[in-house]
Image (cartoon, helix red, strand yellow):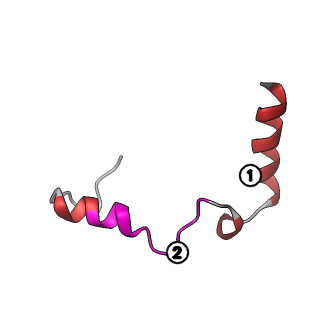
């Protein structure tokens, strides 16, 4: 578990947000969800 924690700490410290595998320039799925649920765009989650 400690190695896994160290791995993710290293990822967050050494990569910019654009260079991680989960980055999306436009989060289309999330946007569509908010639109379909009629949620406010400024909703704090």
C-alpha distance separating marks 2 and 1: 18 Å
Furthest residue toward left: 38
In this view, the residue in front, 42 or 3, is: 3
Give the percent coordinates (x, y) of residue 11.
77, 52
Q: Position of residue 37 (x, y in %)?
A: 17, 56
Q: Which of the pair 5/45 is nearer the observer?
A: 5
Q: Secondary structure at mark 1?
A: helix
Is disc 2 in contact with disc 1, using a CB cutoff of under 8 Å?
A: no
Quadrant housing residue 8: top right
Look at mark 2 in the image and give the residue it sits on.
25
Residue receiving disc 1: 12
The picture quadrant where one finds residue 7 is: top right
Q: What's the residue at 66%, 64% (across, down)?
A: 17
Give the residues in magenta: 22-32
The residue positioned 45% from the left and 74% from the top of the image is 26
Q: Secondary structure at mark 2?
A: loop
Q: Is residue 37 above or below residue 31?
A: above
**Mark 2: few/some/many CA within 10 Å (<14, 14-19, 20+):** few
29 in magenta:
yes
């Amino acid at each position: 578990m400690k190695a896994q924690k160290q791995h993710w700490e290293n990822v967050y410290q050494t990569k910019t947000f654009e260079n991680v595998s989960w980055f999306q320039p436009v989060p289309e799925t999330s946007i569509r969800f908010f639109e379909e649920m009629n949620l406010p765009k400024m909703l704090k989650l």
